[in-house]
Amino acid sequence: MAGLKSTIRSLVGKDTGLPVLFGHEADAERIMDQEISLELYDQMKKYGKAFGVTKRFSHVIQSFKVPEKETPAGFRVEYLLEADGLILADLVRDISYDKNGRKRPTKILFSADSANPYEVESMKDLIGNLTCNPAIIYNQFINNPDANIGGRYKTRDEVLSTIGAMLGPGCDISVELNDPFHSSEAEILEEAARFREMLSEYRVVIKVPHTGPVNAQNVQELMSGDQKLSRRYNQGEPKDFFRGHNLALMLQEHGYRVNYTLMFEPCQTAMALQARPYFINSFIMFRHAQSMQLAGLMKAYEETGDPQFVEQLQTYMVENDYLSAKEGTKDRFAAYTRAREILKYRGFLKDSMADGLDGIRHNLRCLKQANLPDTRLIICNMQGENYYPYIDRLLMEEEFLDMAGRVVITAAPSLLMEFTSNPLVVQFHRRFMNAANGAK
């Protein structure tokens, strides 16, 4: 049996109760018929003496040119009680909401990894976030003649301005700093301000990467010669490893939401959360594929005793930055021991069928414990046919049902589209269309 329902209109108006502040009438009308709980109704009736909207409410409406009697997607309505009994409606950023205060169809949201306006157009009303980094913007779109038709787009800002105009207010847009190593804090804030101007303060999210041992002095090593870093990924100075954390904190303190990226190991998460990010990430495919390669070479050596497999293991670890270049000439069995410890942590020694989704599980557990109710997990880097179906199943497990509203799944549109279909879709269209055309 359905319970009683109430709306703001039942409390507000000349004839029914709370008066609306002069000049607030049009904005207040946007929420008059939105449902509220009976508990909120009772609180408003008891404490309220007048009704209006916040400055932010009006600014959001003006920023997105919202049609009359509507509130935009990407915002939830909250109510504030001022000291004099004035109740103000506010619009708070929340991509879980569609327009007019309705929740999106599912708690789990989707995101697209794309800077291609031509493909974003087809899914702009289905996603809650768009992710752009320099590789996506330049390599996959601007410098790709097959994507950037006729070379129409020349600069990053042209691309982002077009996408910003295309996407509605309900979609966040995560954009990455071009150079987190050489840029000063003032330059980073200037870059973030340009993003905010293009995309609006309500949608922009600044992507900040874990910096690890890379700094302004050694980053050139990654772009010249053999492109190898002279030190191992976990060797260096604390100021370098925590630069990303401190940039994230600095941006957060200046009012920006931060997407903290390049998160591959679960052990990165707790410290990353100290920077109060809006998004954290679980990267899947690269880490899992490398784990399987390490495990395969180790197994080959253990089964045959042939030292060539340890040599191959050491070479692979240097090529993929598990070891520094100078460690490629040192004790090969030290590399074997290191690989074994890495795989032990990743669960590959106790389970030869490890699915690579341990990072997702760990990050959701971390979020469950954290004092950051608005932080969400982006599940990313899941190229190939084998990851999304298992991620989808994992999120339906009982342990994680209460965390579904904290998850965003992102991939290129070309990958996301694959999971909307099945061979039987084609088979049934064949049957239906032939029937409709009179075929026997």
Image: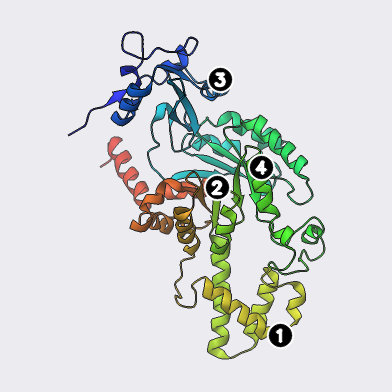
What's under tag 1, amino acid-wise? Asp
Compare marks 4 and 3 and give the one earlier in the sequence. Answer: 3
Compare marks 3 and 2 and give the one earlier in the sequence. Answer: 3
Query: In the visual, does 387 lie left or right of 312?
Result: left
Compare marks 4 and 2 and give the one earlier in the sequence. Answer: 4
What quarter of the picture does the C terminus occupy?
Answer: top left
Query: In the visual, does 120 lie left or right of 350?
Result: right
Q: Residues within 10 Å of mark 4 (few under 14, many from 20)?
A: many
Labels 4 & 3 near each other (Cβ < 8 A) = no
Q: How is the image coloured?
A: rainbow
What's under tag 4, amino acid-wise? Leu
- Across and down, in percent, residue 370 comes to 49, 53
User: Which is closer to the viewer, label 2 or label 1?
Assistant: 2
Please, is residue 202 above or below residue 299 in the view? above
What residue did someone put label 2 on? 279
Q: Which mark is residue 251?
A: 4
Q: Which mark is residue 356?
A: none
State the residue at coordinates (50%, 21%). 66
C-alpha separation, residue under disc 3 versus residue under disc 2: 27 Å
